[in-house]
Amino acid sequence: MNRLLIASLTMFAATHAFADVDAAKAQGIASKNMCFSCHAVDHKVVGPAYHDVGEKYKGDAAAMATLMKKVKGGGSGVWGAVPMPPNPGISDADLKVVLTWVLAGAPKQ
């Protein structure tokens, strides 16, 4: 297979994997874990808008692992000088639901 076809299939698979996201569940988990204190769906608060995060990582096969590490351990410098505090209390399962929603572009329910 040529590289372009492989890249296209990989991007399609990644996009399709996020198509079945449960927006209501993801928003509930994000709310329970205080994520909306610093983030909003469509505009910057303290941290970036979830739509912007989804766009930044669109097509990145490592996005889920990268963002899980950033959310759990905190981070800074990617979106500006304000650091994101670590959020080790969110379960991996809940975090995957939220990040699947974010990476799908944070669609509304």
Image (cartoon, rainbow, N blue to C red):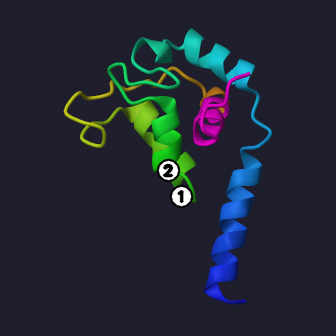
> Dividing the image into 4 quarters, which one contains the N terminus?
bottom right
Look at the numbered disc 2 and give the secondary structure of its residue.
loop
Instruction: Between residue 19 and residue 30, name the one nearer to us.
Output: 19
- Report the Cα–Cα distance between label 2 and label 1: 5 Å
Relative vertical location of residue 7 with respect to residue 52 in this rendering, above or below: below
Instruction: Give the amino acid type for the residue marked by disc 1 in the picture.
Output: Asp
Task: Say which residue label 2 marks.
Answer: 57
Sort mark 1 into few (<14), some (14-19) or many (20+) by Cα contacts within 10 Å.
Answer: some
Instruction: Give the amino acid type for the residue marked by disc 2 in the picture.
Output: Tyr
Look at the numbered disc 1 and give the secondary structure of its residue.
loop
Instruction: Between residue 102 and residue 94, name the one nearer to us.
Output: 102
User: Residue 60 bears which disc, if any?
Assistant: 1
Residue drawn at (74%, 60%) of the image = 13
Q: Is residue 33 left or right of residue 18?
A: left
Farthest residue in the right direction? 20
- Spot occupied by residue 46 in the image (x, y as percentages of width and height): 32, 20
Residue drawn at (57%, 18%) of the image = 30
Farthest residue in the front direction? 42
Q: Is residue 66 visible?
A: yes
Instruction: Between residue 65 and residue 47, name the one nearer to us.
Output: 47
Sort mark 2 into few (<14), some (14-19) or many (20+) by Cα contacts within 10 Å.
Answer: some
Q: Contact (CB < 8 A) between labels 2 and 1?
A: yes
Q: Which region of the structure is painted magenta?
A: 96-109
> Dividing the image into 4 quarters, which one contains the C terminus?
top right
Q: Is residue 108 magenta?
A: yes
Relative vertical location of residue 76 with respect to residue 35 in this rendering, above or below: below
- Spot occupied by residue 92 in the image (x, y as percentages of width and height): 61, 33
Q: How many marks?
A: 2
Quadrant of residue 84 within the rendered picture: top left
